[in-house]
């Protein structure tokens, strides 16, 4: 009985160990591409993030295939023109300073 339980426990540990790498294959390509833009080597990124260099190449291909976001044609908020301030909706002071002037 004891050997049967140990066999089942050992088999379940092996199954879980075999499934673990499949859960860890999710790569955050945003972080990978930031590291690439900072000038880090593929091997350095792979060692730091514990991923393979082929995963880094996949991220580079996905980034090249995806349209570049934030360009002027998409209305980048940092470069877009700000609307003029509407002075008629300006708040009035409530501390009585504007009443003294009237």
Image: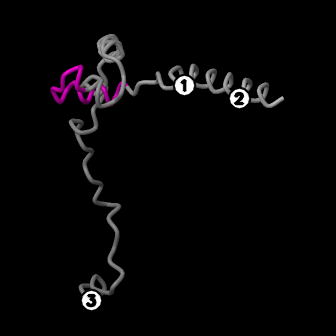
Furthest-left residue in view? 39
| Residue marked by disc 3 | 100
Q: CA distance from mark 1 to mark 3?
A: 75 Å
At horizontal 36% and vertical 27% (from top left) the residue drawn is 50
Looking at this view, is 40 or 98 the one in front? Answer: 40
97 sits left or right of 2 in the view: left
Disc on the earlier residue, 1 or 3 = 1
Looking at this view, is 66 or 38 the one in front? Answer: 38
Quarter residue 43 falls in: top left
What range of the chain is rendered magenta? 29-44
Disc on the earlier residue, 2 or 1 = 2
At horizontal 41% and vertical 24% (from top left) the residue drawn is 27
In the rendered structure, are the residues bearing label 2 and label 3 in contact, judged by CB atoms less than 8 Å apart?
no
At horizontal 34% and vertical 30% (from top left) the residue drawn is 49
At horizontal 79% and vertical 31% (from top left) the residue drawn is 2
Looking at this view, is 15 or 82 the one in front? Answer: 15
How crowded is the residue under tag 3: few (<14 C-alpha within 10 Å), some, or many (20+)?
A: few
Q: Main secondary structure of the magenta part?
A: helix
Q: Please, what secondary structure does the residue beneath circle 3 have? A: helix
Can you give x and y, in whole percent of width and height, for residue 25 in the image?
47, 21
Q: Is residue 64 magenta?
A: no
| Mark closer to the observer (1, 3) | 1
| Residue marked by disc 2 | 9
Looking at this view, is 2 or 37 the one in front? Answer: 2
Q: CA distance from mark 2 to mark 3?
A: 86 Å
């Amino acid at each position: 009985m004891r050997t049967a339980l140990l066999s089942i426990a050992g088999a379940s540990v092996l199954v879980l160990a075999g499934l673990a790498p499949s859960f860890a294959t999710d790569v955050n390509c945003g972080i990978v591409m930031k590291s690439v833009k900072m000038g880090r080597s593929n091997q350095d990124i792979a060692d730091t993030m514990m991923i393979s260099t082929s995963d880094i190449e996949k991220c580079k291909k996905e980034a090249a295939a995806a349209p570049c976001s934030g360009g002027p044609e998409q209305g980048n908020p940092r470069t877009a023109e700000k609307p003029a301030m509407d002075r008629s909706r300006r708040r009035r002071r409530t501390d009585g300073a504007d009443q003294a002037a009237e």
